[in-house]
Amino acid sequence: MSPETQRDSVPSIASPVRTIALLSAGLVLLTACGGGTSSSAAKSGSADGYPVTLKNCGRTVTVEAAPHRAVSVDQGSTEILLSLGLADRLAATSTWTDPVMKGLEKANAKVPRIADNRPSSEKVLDQEPDFISASFESTLAKGGVAPREQFEDLGVPTYVSPADCTGKDNSGGGDGARTAPLTMDSVYEEVRDLAKVFGVQKRGDTLVAQLRARVKKATEGVDASDATLLYWFSDSKAPYLAGCCGAPGIITRELGAKNVFDDTHEEWPQISWETVADRNPDVLVIGDLTRKAQTAESAAKKIEFLESNPVTKNMDAVRHKRYVLLSGQAMNPSIRTVEGVERVAAGLRTFGFAG
């Protein structure tokens, strides 16, 4: 979960009519523990690599056939599927904070968007999905779209990004806390898992290789060990700032820099501006969001606040306008975290902190 996922809860009870329709349609057969399959599905799947069984965030997910009406309920997951060339397999998407990643505009335009924020479970079920993917555990939980069990009881497999559950405790509310630093390996695992689910493993391997190459190119020759960074996602009144070990932690470690709040394992703690000013980071990495859920979502609004607020306007980074602007998705665990590495590296070079 990230601040972008903090929404009002939506109804999560499927109607009996929809339940019957889904079950009778026989979209997919799944049990959370890898249960039985129909003989026809097993026969057709065995020849082409199905069923596919994955361990995912403490669950066993079985997909009996390649999805053709998938619904992706978080932008990060959607952009992976679009990058894998699977627009024609998507019935719908939802929960967007930013324009779609560059290069995916045409593919994205082909897929209906059922909600800019989190949809109700009924809207998702209206698409008659045969697979549902999400970036955050909170999306497919009570208070989100619906608990995973609700969809699985209807025979619809669900998948959540490993980056939101590997080495992370989401039980305490808020945005969770990292028990271990996140690495890009969790993102690469998600790419490969989804490629396997859809039967396009080679595309997954190619995408991972491209992402690895971009990180290597962006960080080549960079030594930012003298630079301190702060990551501001959203809200000016009680700002959500990055802790040590989420996606911003990946960016920081790749560049050898230091996050001024690396002493907290919370994903996105809310910290006072007085504390921020005391730590006086060299560079401010600012989320440039297009949603309108909280105060100061856009980078322009954030910078306006920083340069007018008495507590922040005299910080070194503000006085020297050392700002790096990132999409919300680049600050979440996603394939766009690579974009974050590239942009922060470029900013550090510009500001003279790259070694």
Image (cartoon, rainbow, N blue to C red):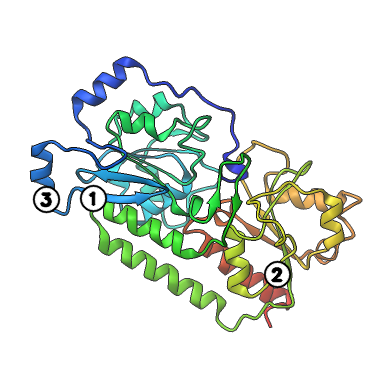
The local crowd at label 3, few if under 14, some if 14 to 19, many if 20 or more residues have their Cα within 10 Å, is: few
Quarter placement of the N terminus: top right
Q: Amino acid at mark 3?
A: Ser
The local crowd at label 1, few if under 14, some if 14 to 19, many if 20 or more residues have their Cα within 10 Å, is: some
Q: Which residue is mark 1?
A: 52
Q: Amino acid at mark 1?
A: Val
Q: Quadrant of residue 71?
A: top left
Q: CA distance from mark 1 to mark 2?
A: 41 Å
Q: Which residue is mark 2?
A: 258
Report whether 240 appears left or right of 83: right
First in sequence: mark 3 or mark 2? 3
Report whether 325 appears left or right of 73: right
State if disc 1 and disc 3 touch (CB < 8 Å). no
State if disc 2 and disc 3 touch (CB < 8 Å). no
Residue 218 image point, x, y percent? 54, 75
Q: Is residue 126 above or below residue 324?
A: above
* Residue 247: image tag: none
* Residue 46: image tag: 3
Q: Is residue 19 above or below residue 250?
A: above
